[in-house]
């Protein structure tokens, strides 16, 4: 069954009298537990599609179902509740808060869920432990390497037990060895049943996912299953 189902999705950006038609009828079906990549040149609409799936932006026409629930224009409060329940975000630039330590960054989603400080820090430490970062808990992001920062961001994305992780160029700021480590972690996360969508420019990254979707000028150009895929690490 589908965790994400997108039907004939259209999206335009309107600036004054100009409209830019960015998504031109996108269909997408992602099953629970799948690990897929979305590729396409700059401007093809990848971020726009990911923002709609993450309920960070609205669409104009078509339909989007998240876990069978139709996602339509809704208040920011309701959107935030859906995001908290279903979606973890991982970004190229990590998006960590610079003046908070690793533990506090990981704990942040639980702050918004009104979990007490003591409890959320305890849970954050468990996630840091899982990601091999227990001894870095009290360090600021500026004291961590790129790979460590991305592991903190992955821990933060996992702490609210999402069904899906949306990763926009998660290895874009990392060297190839560190990228490989981050991909191994994402595969381990995927092996626990969490669906993962990775937007990437890099063939080596896409080649490690179960399905490669190519966007071109707002349309899905190809959607191919990767028979070599394995999330066993
Ligand atoms: P990609 O992620 O594939 O590079 P995007 O979805 O970011 O593509 O952008 C697709 C097109 O939409 C680009 O031409 C971009 O400049 C434009 N675009 C993206 N976001 C906005 C916005 N908020 N307002 C206006 N144009 C936008
Ligand atoms: P990414 O690196 O993820 O593709 P971008 O740097 O393209 O993201 O875009 C960052 C933000 O700026 C997004 O929220 C996007 O919607 C917005 N944006 C992108 N292009 C434009 C544009 N031409 N006009 C206005 N906003 C834009």
Image (cartoon, rainbow, N blue to C red):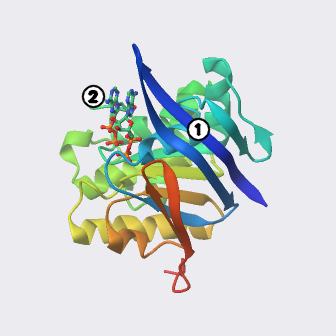
Query: Does residue 124 appear in the picture of this structure?
Result: no
Specify the label residue 126 is tagged with: none
Query: Most extreme residue toward the bottom, as rendered?
Result: 228
Q: Which element type, helix, strand or loop, lies under badge 2?
A: loop
Image location of residue 176, percent across then percent down = 23, 70
As rendered, which of 125 and 89 lies closer to the eye? 89
Residue annotated with mark 2? 99
Q: Is residue 221 above or below residue 232?
A: above
- Residue 105 appears in the figure: yes
Ligand 2, by image quadrant, is: top left
Location of residue 86 by image quarter: top right
Element marked by disc 1: strand
Q: Residue at x 32, y 48 (%)?
A: 92
Residue drawn 38% across the image and 55% down it? 151
Q: Residue at x 69, y 39 (%)?
A: 62
Position above or below: 25 against 228: above
Residue behind label 1 places its C-beta within 8 angstroms of ligand 1: no
Q: Give the x, y percent position of residue 94.
A: 33, 44
Q: Residues within 10 Å of mark 2 (few under 14, many from 20)?
A: few
Side (left or right) of 29 relative to 200: right
Residue placed under numbered mark 1 in the picture:
10
């Amino acid at each position: 069954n589908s965790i994400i189902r997108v039907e004939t999705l259209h999206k335009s950006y309107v600036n004054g009298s100009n409209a830019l038609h960015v998504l031109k009828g996108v269909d997408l079906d992602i099953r629970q537990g799948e690990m897929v990549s979305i590729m396409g040149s700059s401007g093809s609409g990848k971020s726009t599609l990911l923002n709609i799936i993450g309920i960070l932006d609205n669409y104009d026409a078509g339909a989007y179902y998240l876990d069978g629930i139709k996602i339509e224009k809704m208040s920011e409060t309701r959107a935030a509740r859906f995001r908290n329940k279903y979606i973890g975000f991982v970004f190229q630039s990590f998006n960590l808060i610079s003046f908070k330590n690793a533990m506090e960054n990981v704990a942040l989603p639980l702050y918004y869920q009104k979990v007490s400080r003591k409890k959320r820090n305890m849970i954050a430490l468990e996630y840091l432990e899982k990601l091999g970062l227990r001894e870095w808990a009290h360090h600021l992001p500026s004291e961590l390497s790129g790979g460590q920062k991305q592991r903190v961001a992955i821990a933060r994305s996992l702490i609210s037990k999402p069904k899906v992780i949306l990763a926009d160029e998660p290895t874009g700021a990392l060297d190839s060895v560190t990228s490989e480590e981050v991909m191994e972690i994402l595969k381990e996360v995927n092996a626990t049943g969490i669906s993962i969508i990775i937007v990437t420019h890099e063939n080596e990254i896409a080649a490690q996912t179960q399905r490669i979707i190519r966007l071109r000028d707002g349309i899905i150009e190809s959607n191919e299953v990767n028979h070599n895929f394995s999330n066993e690490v």
